[in-house]
Amino acid sequence: MQLLLAAIVVLPLLGAVAALLPAPPRLRGRDPEQAVLRHGVTVTGLVLVLSVALAIGFDYDRAEAMQATTDVRWIPALDIRVHLGIDGISLPLLVMTALLTFLCALYSYFRMPPGGSPMAFVALLLVLEAGTLATFAVLDLILFFLAFEMVLIPMYFLIARWGGQESTAGATPTAADAPAGSDAPAGSDGERAAWRFILYTLLGSVVMLLGLLLIGLKGGTFDMVALASDNGAGLSHSTQVIAVLAIGVGLAVKAPMWPLHSWLPDAHTAAPTVGSVLLAGVLLKMGTYGLVRIALPMAPDGAHTLAPYLAAFAVVGILYGSLACLALALPTSDRGDRLGPAAALTPARPKADLKRLIAYSSVGHMGFVLLGIATLTPTGVNGALFANIAHGLITGLLFFLVGALKERFGSTDLDQLAGGARASGAALYGRAPRLGGLLAFGAVASLGLPGLAGFWGEMLAMFGAYEPADGLSRPAYLTFLALAGLGTLLTAAYLLIVVRRVCMGEPATGGALATAGAPAPDGTPATAVPAAVGAATAASGTTRTAETPPDAAPADTAPSDAGSLGPASPAATATAGSPRRDDAIADVRGHELAAWTPLVVLTVLAGLWPAALLGLTDPAVQHLLGGGS
């Protein structure tokens, strides 16, 4: 078990170094770029296998105890040790990290984002995996900080080099903008988003380091197990408050907590598909994990003092994220009419980007995680940990699906997707029913439908708010509970609007099918649709019917392009002057099915059998909150 955990942490680093070296002749094959991508799949797959083996060998009757521990002196002068171990809190996060990274590597093998060398891409992906796995496995405060910071540089380059900007609404992407079947190459938006990401997180980390040093120096050790067992006995009340405040600010940036969240939507919008999956599914969990692992057991008095403020910020984040998503989900012309006075509370909306919407939804969902932690009860903290896992699975799936939409349509703008459905006469259910069904599944799982993973974490967090820890104001937490309940209703509203617009389509204005550039019978202008949609519709003079196969590809395109040609595909104009159907898109491909199926299965299993996860986390949570007793 010790060797397994050490190998899980070290193997990605060794794989990153190997990815930068020339491949052996026998492993190089005909395409060296595919060889290095295959290397990434192999290394992350091996790490996943080792993680599953570690989970099988874990003693579930002692989930509260640290297992597979390694404790080696590293810097004796500072009493810094290479201390590794897992318990019921860290094991699920470690396995989920290994799973998501493997799925991202597998997806990239078939859909490598343009913008840089595959060697650098695989190396950065493996370094990112090593940092996140180490964050959940180390038991020394200084090592925790180093692992926490280790993920910043690879994520910065993934966003800046392989991220980019999408085409503007109504314009056909060019080869330099957003080539069909791939994420957009690096652009100014990607660089700005990457700089904003790293500046926010670095500034927060500097403050967090001061809090970690304060706890370690005042407590006499940097060992996280010993400090948790002391339960703040050697720290004064003021020291604990200052430490929790400093650590909390640094972790809240990564969580992200309102109002320190503003880097997140830009980062998600600019990042490539796999970058968004890892950012939402793994990196955000590092912040909330740090609060549970460090703040609650090591400085309980400081956590108790600041808990109501954390709960208040969490609830504001729930409502803010939901209202922002609702503003993005509604058609542009209906935003002010349907939101009414609430429209003034939402941010400016330059473009209804689906990736941006899911990013804002993460602010709301992580608000439930922070609310559960702020209750300081086993029920609330268990709900927060469950919501962490559920959010990683569901939001990872949603970002994969949005990436697939971008490959097929050249954009993730909601108005373009809905306008394209109106112009072609069929929405996603009719054109790619499996893809539409998966998008609807991810949406209803995200809104917390009972029987799926998203339900239990949010429900337990609100249960914890109903009965907060002793000494916390119950009327205040009941108010937080009511506001969080309102947030669940807003979440259901915007996600169902997204499903209706993208999957089911919108009714044509005036009861007639609105075509590109043509007014409706009542005289109102038709909804703007992508230029490629209007051009293809005008050229063909036909509208897709229900009998047209959703995955039918135009006869004049190469087989390798089939499925990646959407309304905004540049390949639509690359043929010899012959028209093509704008609705010919592929349904779920084989590699997509392989990458998405584990997330769907685990989302269902966690929803139907929550005791499997709660039985693992609850003993460890009771142990931490009880000061090791």
Image (cartoon, rainbow, N blue to C red):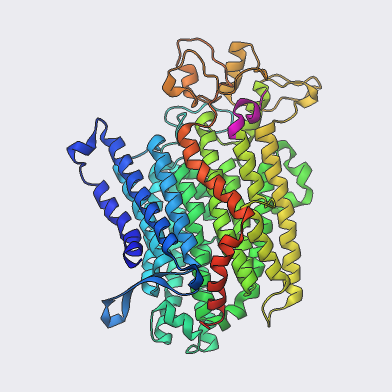
In screen coordinates, is 620 left or right of 219? right
Is 57 located above or below residue 448 in the figure?
Answer: below
Quarter of the rendering occupied by the N terminus: bottom left
Is 552 located above or below residue 91 in the figure?
Answer: above
Question: Which residue occupies the foreground of this view, 246 or 199?
Answer: 246
Q: Which residues are magenta?
A: 426-435
Q: Position of residue 325 (x, y in %)?
A: 65, 48
Q: Position of residue 460 (x, y in %)?
A: 67, 64
The quadrant holding residue 474 is bottom right
Q: Residue at x 76, y 47 (%)?
A: 339
Q: Residue at x 60, y 11 (%)?
A: 540
In screen coordinates, is 193 left or right of 300? left
Q: Look at the image and tell me whether residue 370 can be seen.
A: no
Farthest-out residue, left: 25
Is 34 located above or below residue 310 in the figure?
Answer: above
Q: Residue at x 44, y 67 (%)?
A: 205
In screen coordinates, is 182 left or right of 456? left
Q: Residue at x 63, y 74 (%)?
A: 377
Question: Which residue occupies the foreground of this view, 189 or 137?
Answer: 137
Q: Is residue 184 magenta?
A: no
Q: Position of residue 471 (x, y in %)?
A: 68, 83
